[in-house]
Image (spheres, helix red, strand yellow):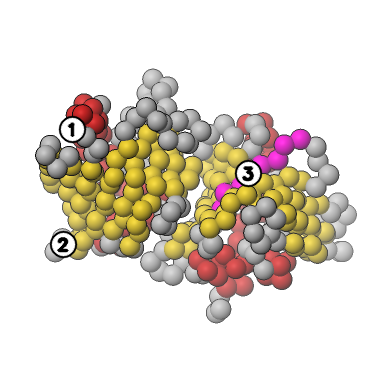
Amino acid sequence: MPITSVTKDPEALTMTVTADFAVPVQRLWDAFADPRELERFWGPPTYPATFTRHDMVVGGRSQYLMRGPDGDSPAGFWEFLTVDAPRSFEVIDGFAQPDGSANPDMPRMRMTFEFSETPEGSRLVNTTWFGSAEELEQLIGMGMEEGMREAMGQMDAVLADLEAFAAGRGAVSQILSDTQVRVSRVIRGTVEQVWRAHHEPELLKRWMLGPDGWTMPVATAAEKVGDAYRFEWAPVPGGPADGAPPFGFEGELLESNPPHREVTSERMIGMEGPGTTNELTLTPREDGTTLLTVVITYPSAEVRDMVLATGMTDGMEASYARLESELVGV
């Protein structure tokens, strides 16, 4: 078990958890910065977590859902107050309602996560500040300490699993819920470069092409919240897609926090009915690469499965491989 001590101070209204790991500080930090890794330990084994949002920047927000053995689904959120990679971050931690908003009937806490080097590897000191003695007693009584021990007891296995999250594995899709899919890819390029590649029309036309045999004659990007965007593709004459009909997507920029996160609506041009909501998050990594995640929310499970069956993930991987080629040497 990595936890070496748990100290509760009723006068200071704090609980401090100290845990030691046989890995460098950066490796420990990366486990918290990557939602794919974080959800493998943030929650006891009987209540595994799924993160539907995780933008680890000041002013950013995380949202997660836990699934219990009896079908219950407690939800939570973090609001990031400070982020000093790879040394510390501070959040407001709270309980959430099914839509991700704060649950007004449950307490909020302030939490700090501090990472430091040790002769054997690294140390995490996690301190929680409660609003009152009653809140401290309530949450400890709900099993907060036991849950933390069980959750961090899973971390050694996660930290040892470097291969699963290494660069070069290609785009991977994961079903998060009945209507949500997350696509992840480590891109060899900085956050700023990857963000620019998503917003400069001439760059978009060179990499966002999907499978071979297509061109992108129209790439109108949205510049500010409320702006519309429009992307269109056409087959290359004589190419592998020759004879296929042209198609396109359009939508609106709903949220933007350059160069880390944006949310857009999306619908196929000429199609009736509701479209999707796409949340793009870019997270910097220690080696200068960028973890790109896109959470796509579909109107139904049927639409989700239909789109996945078209080979969407393979098409996105082909595009991201071109994106890397564009960024090499930049």
Counting residues from the N terminus, which is met first, the one under dot 3 or under dot 2? 2
Is residue 294 shown to the viewer in this render? yes
Task: Determine whether the residue tagged by mark 3 lies in a helix, strand or loop.
Answer: strand
Please give left or right for residue 56 compared with residue 19 in the image. Answer: right
Which residue is depicted at the point 70% across and 44% down?
310
Q: Which residue is nearer to you in this view: 72 or 163?
A: 72
Q: Which mark is residue 118?
A: 2
Residue assigned mark 1: 133
Is residue 239 shown to the viewer in this render? no
* Disc 2 to disc 1, C-alpha distance: 33 Å
Location of residue 171 in the rendering, given as x and y in whole percent from the top left corner: 55, 54
Residue assigned mark 3: 277
Counting residues from the N terminus, which is met first, the one under dot 3 or under dot 1? 1
Location of residue 150 in the rendering, given as x and y in whole percent from the top left corner: 24, 36
State whether residue 325 is above or below residue 83: below
Write the start and end of the magenta stretch as one range: 273-280
Q: Determine contact: label 3, label 1, CB under 8 Å.
A: no
Name the front one of labels 3 and 1: 1
Amino acid type assigned to the residue bearing label 2 in the image: Thr
